[in-house]
Structure formats: C-alpha cells, structure tokens
Image: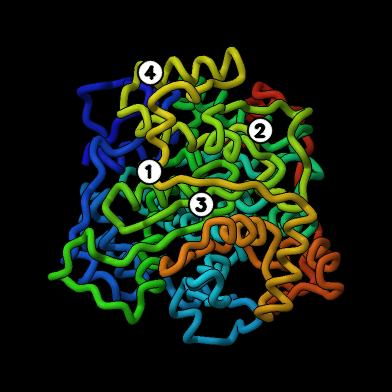
C-alpha cells in the first residue's frame, strides 16, 4: 500500500503506513490517502460478517497497514478492542455481553417503513466515539516508537471529545507527550473535567483564547514549520492523521453487518445484490463521515451517507449548494452540540480530492481559494453534480430541534441520547427510505452534555459509576493566546 498527498508532493515516492503514522500532514500541507483504495469482495464480506470486533479490525486494517507484520497487527487489534476497555455501556456498565460486542447496534424502532438504529460507539474510556480510533492510535504509536527508539510530541486540537480520548489513550505511553489545545470555556463541564483533571506527567492541556478553528489552525501552522516539526518530533492525533480515519472505517463494516443481520447474503451473492444500508453521521471536521466515504469506496454496500451539522453548517451548505465557505471566529456559533462547533472541516479535503478525480493541481487551486478568498464554489461545475454518485446528502439541526429530538427519542423509545447524536437522528429522519436500514452513529454518552439533557428531559443524564465526582477533581491547564509561536515556545520549554 502506497500513500500519496492530496496536494501532489512527492509524486513517485513511496510512503508506507508506518512512514506516515507519526507525521500527520504531508510536507506540502496536504493529507495522506492510499494511492488506490483496497476493494472488498462478496467472499470477504461473507467471511467477515460474524467476526468479533478485534478480528474484524485486523482484517480491515491489514488492507491498509501491509508493512506491519500480520502477527503484530492482530495482537495490536486484540489489545485495543477488549471488553474491559469498552465496559461503559450506557445504563448497563456491568453487561459483559454488551461490552464484548464493543459497538452494539441499538434498534430504536420502525419509522417510515424502515429500521432506525443507533450504533453505540461511546462505551470506551471517555464515553465518546473518538475512543474507537484513539485507543488503537495509542497502541500503534507505542509499538512504532519502541521499534525505532524514537519519541513523539503529539500536538492536537479538540472541540471537546478528541482531546480527552487522545489523552486517555496516550497517558503513560512510553516515548509520548501530549500537548492538547482546546477553546477556553467552550466545552461542556464534563468534557473540560475529563481533560483538565488528568495529572499524568506526559499530558499538557492548553486552553486557547478563541474557538476550535483557532486551535486547529495552530496545529496546522506548527505542522507546516518543517524545521520545528523535525526538531521536536511533532505528531498529531487529529483526524488529519490517516490512522485515525482508517480505524474508524472498521465500525462502518461492523454497523453494516449488524444492520443486515438475518438477511440472506453470502459469498455466492454478487456484491451489487448485497443489502444496502444508510448511515447518518453528526459532522464537524468531516473525519467520521470521511471514514464512511472510504468504506463505501472500498465496496461496502452503503446507500447514503447523511451529513448532519449543527448551526455551524458549512458542510450542509456545501452538500446543498456546492459552495464551501469557511467561517471566522465571529461567525462560529457556540452551541449545545459543541464538538461540532467547527467551520473549517480539515478532512473535507480528502473527499474533495476524490470528487475532483484525484487531480492535485485542481485541489491545490481550490484550497488556495479557501486561504485567500474564504472558500470555493463548485455549484456550476460538473464536479458538484457528481456528489450524488458518492452517496452524500445533508441536513442541519438547531438547539430547538435537538432538544425536541432528545425528548422524542426518550418518550418514544426510552433511550437517552446526547446532543450530537440528536442532530444525527433529526437529520436522518429526513432521509428514511422504505426497506433501507438507517444507522445513526452515536457520538457520545448523554452525561457529557448534562445541561441540555436536563433542559430536554427535566432529569439528570445517566452517569456511569466510574465517572462519579469527575467535575470536582482538581484541574491542571494553562490559558494561552491563539498564537502559534506561543504554543511552539511552550512545547520547547516542556520537552526534554
């Protein structure tokens, strides 16, 4: 498997999975993708559909990580996806059966002639879907660093869940330090406490005076300073890191197999005749739904990929109109689904690269317009007309609609969902089609957004026992301005 940059640097060079694992951005500022997506067959789907999660992860990952010995990769997958790590099933933390399933499919009910379900992705250590990739990333980093004798300083940005998932995955890992940027006073109380209460010596929390996009811009600026990046061994865990995305591809396969359980399809069934499933994905930085795009490009029979945004609707605007228009801090809303308060979707570049027929020159021109003009317009081009071929549709949620959805799902199905998942359910309902199961990817457990749960349901969110008293723990963090040089100085001062 060879990896290439979306912006064309190093054309003709060979980059393995291990080559790009620690680095994040390519040297030209582009994002890495496989030169060709691996293709799955009906025989492989038939063989994979009943595998335990760890073994399914191995099968999917080995198509992308062929430079890692298969015995090592299988061991890494089984070390990562263990029942004791994913034991925080909502309201049922002692259920060994649910924990062993890692990502249970929770059927809500039948609506509009089809089944609406949640794929539970938030039973990990920080109660958010980010754990599914971060736990693997932590083990991959430690494995690779031990092999090479290197060390790594991770620089990341978070709007809420990435930070805690990364820190819990990296705490205590040999050869790894984490410098995590988050928007000061713009996360929920639970999210803030999860991150800032960590006292591990290799974890550093920096609260940036600004919004998430300011923090993300700093990460990109530091990554593009190649001399600093090399001197201080800077890596990233944001979804610009390819390993994050490929780890998320796995649960699309898992969700698909769960949604078609009981339906006949085997190795003799042509791939085109396998049942179709749609996925609705709460989206901010486009990483989670980009993994679905990749799974679909591999041949997984996905019908629609439903992009659900909150009031920060840059992605919904694009998929409706062909206009990609990033917003500045003044136009970025602080909402009750704060992990999606993002107006510059970093992973979107990977999809646009495919949309443009993998033409790096055209992609560079478009993203030059993003930097100089604030966006680009594909409405009049044939490129935008091709969006439908990739299965994408979209919709937008607001505070009022997400509160109403939380209340409706609780009253109708006795299921409590968080604010982001509510955005996903609300938009998914716009695209239900008879006979095609709709799977909403759960974002987090409701306790992470307790204030809105109280508003919607007039009751407290379910809190797994392991998180009692979290907000009362001492917190350790430092407030910094939205300035890349100040962050560089901090890293230099705290790196041995």
Quadrant of res 45: bottom left
Using the image, tell me which numbered label, if any, was put on residue 213: 2
At x 30%, y 57%, the residue is 300
- Name the residue tied to disc 4: 362
Q: Is residue 301 above or below residue 496?
A: below
At x 51%, y 51%, the residue is 306
Q: Is residue 90 left or right of residue 86?
A: right
Where residue 80 sits in the image (x, y, percent)?
42, 65
- Name the residue tied to disc 1: 390
Mark 4 / mark 2, whichever is N-terminal: 2
At x 44%, y 41%, the residue is 241
Q: Is residue 268 above or below residue 185?
A: below
Mark 1 / mark 4, whichever is N-terminal: 4
Mark 3 / mark 1, whichever is N-terminal: 3
Foreground: disc 4 or disc 2: 4
Crowdedness near tag 4: few (<14), some (14–19) or many (≥20) residues, C-alpha within 10 Å: some
């Amino acid at each position: 498997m060879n990896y290439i940059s979306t912006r064309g640097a190093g054309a003709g060079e060979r980059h393995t999975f291990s080559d790009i694992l620690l680095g994040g951005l390519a040297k030209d500022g582009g994002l890495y993708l496989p030169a060709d997506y691996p293709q799955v067959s009906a025989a492989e789907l038939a063989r994979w559909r009943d595998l335990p999660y760890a073994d399914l992860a191995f099968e999917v990952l080995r198509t992308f990580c062929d430079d890692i010995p298969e015995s090592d990769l299988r061991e890494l997958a089984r070390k990562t996806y263990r029942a004791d790590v994913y034991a925080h099933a909502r309201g049922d933390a002692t259920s060994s059966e649910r924990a062993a399933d890692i990502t249970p499919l929770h059927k809500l009910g039948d609506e509009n002639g089809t089944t609406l379900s949640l794929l539970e992705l938030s039973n990990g250590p920080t109660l958010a879907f980010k754990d599914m990739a971060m736990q693997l990333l932590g083990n991959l980093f430690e494995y690779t660093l031990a092999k090479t004798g290197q060390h790594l300083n991770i620089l990341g940005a978070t709007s809420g869940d990435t930070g805690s998932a990364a820190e819990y995955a990296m705490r205590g890992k040999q050869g790894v330090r984490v410098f995590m940027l988050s928007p000061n006073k713009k996360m929920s109380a639970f999210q803030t406490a999860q991150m800032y209460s960590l006292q591990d010596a290799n974890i550093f929390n920096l609260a940036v005076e600004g919004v998430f996009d300011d923090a993300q811009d700093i990460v990109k600026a530091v990554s593009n300073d190649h001399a600093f990046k090399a001197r201080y061994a800077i890596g990233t865990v944001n979804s610009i890191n390819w390993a994050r995305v490929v780890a998320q591809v796995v649960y699309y396969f898992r969700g698909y197999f769960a949604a078609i359980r009981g339906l006949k399809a085997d190795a003799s069934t042509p791939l085109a005749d396998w049942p179709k499933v749609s996925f609705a994905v709460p989206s901010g930085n486009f990483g989670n739904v980009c993994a679905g795009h990749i799974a679909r490009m591999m041949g997984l029979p996905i019908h629609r990929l439903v992009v659900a945004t909150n009031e920060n609707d840059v992605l919904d605007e694009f998929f409706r109109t062909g206009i990609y228009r990033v917003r500045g801090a003044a136009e970025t809303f602080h909402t009750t689904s704060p992990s999606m308060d993002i107006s510059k979707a970093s992973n979107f570049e990977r999809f646009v690269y495919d949309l443009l027929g993998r033409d790096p020159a055209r992609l560079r021109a478009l993203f030059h317009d993003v930097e100089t003009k604030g966006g680009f317009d594909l409405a009049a081009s044939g490129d935008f007309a091709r969006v439908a071929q990739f299965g994408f549709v979209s919709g937008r949620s607001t505070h009022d609609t997400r509160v109403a959805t939380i209340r409706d799902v609780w009253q109708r199905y006795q299921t409590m969902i968080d604010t982001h998942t509510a955005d996903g359910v609300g938009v998914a309902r716009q695209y239900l089609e008879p006979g095609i199961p709709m799977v909403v990817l759960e974002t987090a457990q409701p306790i992470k957004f307790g204030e809105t749960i109280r508003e919607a349901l007039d009751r407290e969110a379910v809190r797994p026992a392991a998180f009692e008293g979290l907000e009362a723990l001492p917190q350790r963090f430092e407030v910094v301005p939205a300035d890349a040089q100040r962050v560089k100085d901090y890293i230099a001062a705290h790196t041995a």
